Image (cartoon, coloured by chain):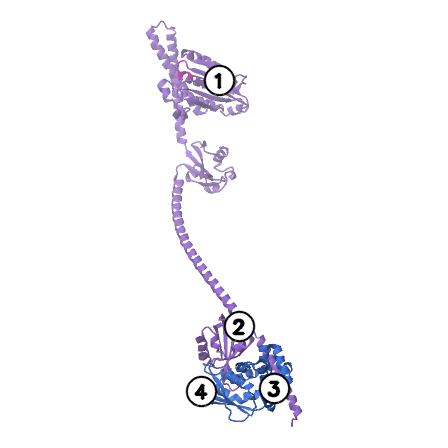
Amino acid sequence: MLIVSKQDLEKIKRMEGQTVGLSLKTDRKFVLEKKGKEGLEKVEREMAKLGYPLKYEEIENYQWYPVQLDPLFLSVSQRTFNWDDKVMWEWGRWGAKTHFIVKLMIRYFISKEIIAKSANKFWRKYYTRGTLDFKLSKKENSGIVTIRDFITCPAQYRYLEGYFFQIMSLVVPPEKLKVEQVEALEENSLRFKTTW
Amino acid sequence: MVDKEQIESLLQITREDLRDLEMYVQEYSAFLPLAVSTINPLGIILNSNQAFQKLSGYKEIEMIGKKMEDLFLNKEDFKDLIEEKIFEGKPSLTRKMTFLTKEKKKIPVNMAISARKDEKGNFIGYFIALSDITAFEDLRKNLEKKVKERTKDLEMRTQEIAESRTALMNILEDVEGARGRAEEERDKTLAIFENFPEGLLFLDKENKISSVNPSVRDFFQLDPKEAVGKKIDELEKKSPLTPLIDILRESPKGIYRKELKLRENLILEISAIPVMRVEEKIGTLIILRDITREKTIERLKTEFVSISAHQLRTPLSAVKWTLRMILDRELGEISKEQREFLEKTYLSNERMIHLINDLLNITRIEEGRFLYNIKSQDIVKIAERIVASSEEMARRKELDFRFQKPKVKIPEIELDPEKISLVFQNLLDNAIHYTKTGGLVKISLNYLKDKKEILISVKDTGIGIPKDQQKRVFTRFFRGANAIKTETEGTGLGLFIAKNIVDAHGGRIWFESKENKGTTFYFTLPARREFEEFLTGF
C-alpha cells in the first residue's frame, strides 16, 4: 500500500519544472531535527518505493532537481509521521527561517512593499516553474499572494501558509498577522490572503 | 554561440562557487567571536551568528523574527538610539548597553550598530555587534571599588596627616616656648657664669675643658683659646693652667677641696664638684676661690697668737716658779689661809700656761711646722710614761685605771715623741676629767700586724658625747654641752691638736660614744717603712 494516495501521486507526477537542492535539503533538515536520522531514512525509503530514491547526502545545494521531489517529501513525511496541519504550518515557518535562500534574500525583508515587489524574484530562487505574485491592499491592510502555473498538493498548503506568515512577520507585527488560503481563481494556481 | 555543454559547465562552476561561498559564510559565522545580528529597519532580527546565539541563549530559529529591542534591559534607549542616531546620518556608533538573555540574565555589552544600505544607497537595516564586557565591567567595578577604597584611605590618611601636622605644630610651638625658656635660662646661667666672682672651670665627662669664666682667665692670665676644647692631659706643659691641672690629676674623684698657691699674692682654694644629670655624670665643675686675703688674715692671726703666747708664757713661767718657791716655803713660812690662796693662784697659772701651750701648738699646726723631732721610738714606753703621770689624778678620783699592754712586741716606729705624748695626754686627761668617781678608764695598745699599724684606744665610762654634737668633736674650741656643765675648765683645743698630730703621722683618729655611758677614742699610727718617707714631708 502506497503511503501517498494514488490521486496525489499522479498529481505530483504531473508537476513540471525543477527546484533547487538547497530547498530539498532544508526540508529534510526539519525531519532530521524532529525525528532524527532514522526518521529521515524512513521517509527516504518510502520515497524510494515511490520511485524517488534520492538520499539526503546526495543532494547538492545548488543543483536543480525535479520539482516533484518537493511536495512528495512533504506528503510522505506528513503521512509517515501522521503530522497534522499545525506541524505542517510550523514546518513552513521553520523553512522560512532556515533556508539559505532566505538569508540570501534578506535585504528584501525591509517592508511589505519591497517584499511584494520582490516576490517573483524570490520564487525564482526556489523553482524554475511558476510565478509568485503579491498584491498589497493598503486600505485593507492586506495582500493576496498568488502562485500560478504551478501544480501543488494539499501537503504544501499549510506549509506555504506558515512560510508566508514567517516572511510577513518580518515586516508586520506577528500578533496582528494572519495568512489563510483562499479559493484559487485559475487552474494550477494557489491563493493566500494575508491581513494585519 | 555557447552550446548546452558549455552552459552546463559554467553553471557547475557557479554552483561550486556558491557552495564555497556558503561554506565560507557558515565557517565565518561559526568562527566570529563577536556576536553579530542583522536586523531590518523595523528592528526585527533577520539572522545572527553563533556567537550571538551563545550570548543570548536563543537558538537562531527562536531569534529570527524577534524584536531586537526586547533583548535589552532598557528598550527605550535602544529604540532612541536607532531612531535618533542612525537616522541622523551616523552610519555607526558604539554604546554600552545591558543585554537580556533568554534566561533573563543581564550582561553588560558594548554594542556597535552599523547601518546597512543596498547598492543604490537605500537603507535596508542594521548590523548589530555585541561584545560581552562582563569581565571588563567586573574589572572596572573592582578598580572603581579599589579606587574608592584607596580614595577613602587617602582621605583618612590626609586627615591623619592634617591632624599630625596640627599636633606637630602644637609640639613645635611648645618646643619653641621651651627653647625660649631654655635660652632665657641659658642666658641667665651664662650671665652668672661670666660674672661670678670666683673662678669657674667646667670639665666635660671626657675631661675636656668646656668653658672657663673671666675670673679663671684673670687668675691664670689665660687665653681661653689655648685651653677650651682641650683635654687636660693634652695641655702644653707651659700652659698657665699647669699648676691647677697637676692638682686635678692627683686629686681623688668626687668632691674635694685643695689649696693652690699660684703666686706670692694669690692663693686659690680649689673645689671640685661632680655635675650630675639624673644619675649620669656629665662633667666636673672646678670652683676657684681667691683665699689670699683669708690666708693672710689667718697668717697674721696665727703670728699674733704665737707672739702673744710667747710673750705671755715667759711672765707666766716666772709667776709659776715664784709661786712654787713661796708654796715650798723657800721664802719663809706662810699661813694656811695664804697657802690656800696661793695654791688656787698656782693652779690658775698652770691652766693659763696650758692654754698658751695649746695655742702655740695650734699656731705651729697652722704654720705647718708642727712635727720637727721625728725619731724611732717605742710607743709602749711613751704610753707608760703618760699613764704613770696620770695615775695620781685617777687615783684621786678613785677610778678603775687600767693600762693594757700589747700581747706581742711592738716594733719601734718613727714619730715625734713629744707630740704623740700630747695625744696620749689629751685623751687621758679628757677620760679622767669626764668620768665620775668609781668609773673606768682603760688604755690599750695593739699591734695590727696585717695592717702594719698600731692601734691605741682610750676607753672611759664617763659622760659621753651627745650624738648631735659628735660631728664637731675634732674642731677648734669644741666642748660638749654636758662637758661644760660638768667641768667648767678646758680649752676645747685638745682633740683638735690630737687629730692634727695623728693626721700628721699618717694615722687615723675616731671615737665611739654614748651619752652617759662612756666614750672610746681610737687612733692608729703606721708601722711601716714608707711612713718614714711620709713623715719627711712635714
Neighbours of disc 3 within 10 Å: few (<14), some (14-19), many (20+): many
- Which circle, 3 or 2, is nearer the viewer? 3
Count the numbered circles shown.
Answer: 4
Q: Which residue is mark 2?
A: B55
Where's residue B517, x and y in %? Answer: 41, 19
Q: Secondary structure at mark 4?
A: loop
Q: Which residue is mark 1?
A: B444
Disc 4: which chain? Answer: A
Q: Is label 3 on the same chain as label 4?
A: yes
Residue at far front of view: A1
- Which circle, 4 or 1, is nearer the viewer? 4
Which residue type carries mark 4?
A: Asn
- Which circle, 4 or 2, is nearer the viewer? 4
Which residue type carries mark 1?
A: Ser
Residue B369 in sight from this viewpoint: no
Q: Which residues are the magenta region?
A: B431-438
Q: Secondary structure at mark 1?
A: strand
Disc number placed over residue A141 in the picture, else none: 4
Disc number placed over residue A69 in the picture, else none: 3
Chain A colour?
blue
Q: Mark 4 and mark 2: span between their CA atoms?
A: 37 Å
Chain B colour?
purple
Residues at badges 3 and 2 in contact (C-beta under 8 Å)? no
Q: Nearer the viewer, residue B471 or B118?
A: B118
Which residue type carries mark 2?
A: Leu
Q: Earlier in the sequence, mark 1 or mark 2?
A: 2
